[in-house]
Image (spheres, rainbow, N blue to C red):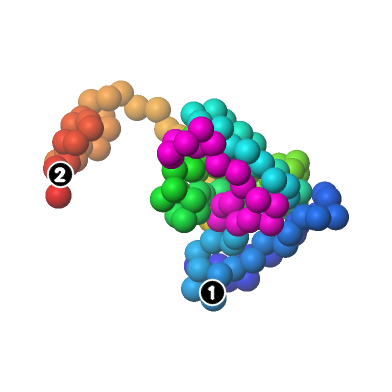
Amino acid sequence: MQDNVEVFFAKLHEDAYTPTRGSKFAAGWDIYALEETVVGKEKSSKIRTGIALAIPEGWEGQLRSRSSLGAKGMIMPNGIGTIDADYRGELLVLSVWIGEGESITIQKGERVAQLVIAPIPETKFTEMNVEDLPTTERGSGGFGSSGRF
């Protein structure tokens, strides 16, 4: 495990917030809304953060929903947003409201997501015939085939 990964960031707007960590054991860094944003029922909304990142090569950013907002009904339609190491644009939080009511209003300065920095291993894909793939006990069993518990 590599320690001390340094992620550079820039404030694109004077009101942008610096990412913070809730505790020394927190896996993610809290990301804040730059401005008040209304997230409508079953409609994708982009919540501005006003920051840009420079994630080191070999790493990615994983933008995740905050559990407190998810419990109310705000989700990320893509589950986890991936921020590639070469992206330098504004960090946006893609959100959808599925909770009670027609919308939720996110306040300026509200924590809206968590950013987890994760390693990306060097990966190579090698094509094979399907009968030459290594076998497993599960085999080609799909959804739910590994059991419920």
Q: Residue at x 18, y 31 (%)?
A: 141
Residue 129 rendering spot, x and y as whole percentages: 30, 23
Q: Is residue 42 visible?
A: yes
Q: Is residue 101 left or right of residue 117?
A: left
Are circles 2 and 1 on residues that touch, CB within 8 Å? no
Towards the viewer: 94 or 4: 94
Q: Which residues are magenta?
A: 92-114
Answer left or right for 92 relative to 65.
Answer: right
- Is 26 above or below relative to 131? below
Residue 100: percent from the left, percent from the top?
A: 43, 39
- The x, y position of residue 88, in whole percent, is 75, 44
Residue drawn at 22 percent across, 31 percent down: 142
Most foreground residue, 74 or 54: 74
Q: Amino acid at mark 2?
A: Arg
- Locate residue 94 relative to residue 27 in the image: left or right: right
Please name the predominant secondary structure of the magenta segment in the image. Answer: strand
Residue 49: give x, y in percent of width and height. Answer: 71, 48
Q: Which residue is mark 2?
A: 148
Secondary structure found at label 1? loop
